[in-house]
Amino acid sequence: MSDIGWLIFDVEAVADGDLISKLKYPDQELSGDAAIARYRQELMEEKGSDFIAHTFMLPISVAIAKVTQDFHLDDIVVLDDPDYRPASITNLFWQGWRHYKRPTFVTFNGRGYDLPLMELSAYRFGLSLPDWFQVSGRSFDQARNRYNTSSHLDLMDMMSNFGASRLQGGLNVLANIIGKPGKTGIDGSQVQDMYDNGGVREINDYCMCDVLDTYFVFLRTRVLTGQLTLDEEHERVVETKNYLEKRAADCKAFEHYLSHWGDWQPPEKESTENKESV
């Protein structure tokens, strides 16, 4: 248990229709579903996107890869399976972080969406998190400090130098560069409609695939930082593929991921004869 050093996670969420109805349309007595539909339409007309801010959202899927301190995949889970209740998901998320002795969260763009959503959900459901909200600690030691990567490593922050550059294509690009599936027909913009059509299991499968992409990108960043060699990274990739293959018959997410699997191809070695180094 204590060997878990990293929790790589992804969150998918659906709109809180009752809250939207109450705050956006207070005098119209709209049902939750009607309020969501109207708000999405208004957002699309105004902004060209029906993306709803996390303040109006409820977590319906949290997938987590438990990774050892030396970067081996231990397990992948989705929380509150098969019920996927927002309050239970939130409670299990923060309980798990404590259970494993507060390992480092790893996300892709989690600082801008996933973690704020889970923090707000803790607020909504009345959880106490003094070990995360370290308001009396020195600012640079606080878990929520943007540059405290020992508490939360956001791979988008890392690869964009904390926003100094724009990482166009995001996780999908980084995954494809190293041969992994990336987006394979589903993205976050489809989650609300999938949920409305009873596809909560499919949402959780999609979430697990995103976590797998994030794990493999995380491994390659450990090569960048010198914590793994390419050979050590390859060993962990092979181990993880074996893990997925053993469980694919009972897990559609793993079966789907393997069907789009690719291996990173190292560049051909070029002759250095008569060439000077920089």
Image: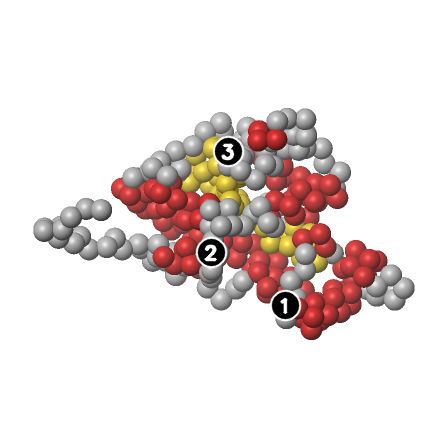
Q: Position of residue 143 (x, y in %)?
A: 59, 33
Quick check: 130 left or right of 169?
right
Mark with earlier residue (2, 3) = 3
- Residue at image location 79% in from the left, 55% down from the top: 19
SS at circle 3: loop
In the picture shown, does residue 177 fall above or below 87? below
SS at circle 1: loop
Instruction: Name the residue that disc number 3 marks.
Output: 150
Quick check: 271 left or right of 95?
left
The amino acid type found where label 1 is placed reads Ser
Circle 2 crowding by C-alpha within 10 Å: few under 14, some 14–19, many from 20 = some
Instruction: Name the residue that disc number 2 marks.
Output: 167
Residue 104 visible in image = no
Circle 1 crowding by C-alpha within 10 Å: few under 14, some 14–19, many from 20 = few
Q: Nearer the viewer, mark 2 or mark 3?
A: 2
For the residues labelled 2 and 1, the Cα–Cα distance comes to 20 Å
For the residues labelled 3 and 1, the Cα–Cα distance comes to 34 Å
Residue 234 visible in image = yes
Q: Nearer the viewer, mark 2 or mark 1?
A: 2
Instruction: Name the residue that disc number 1 marks.
Output: 49
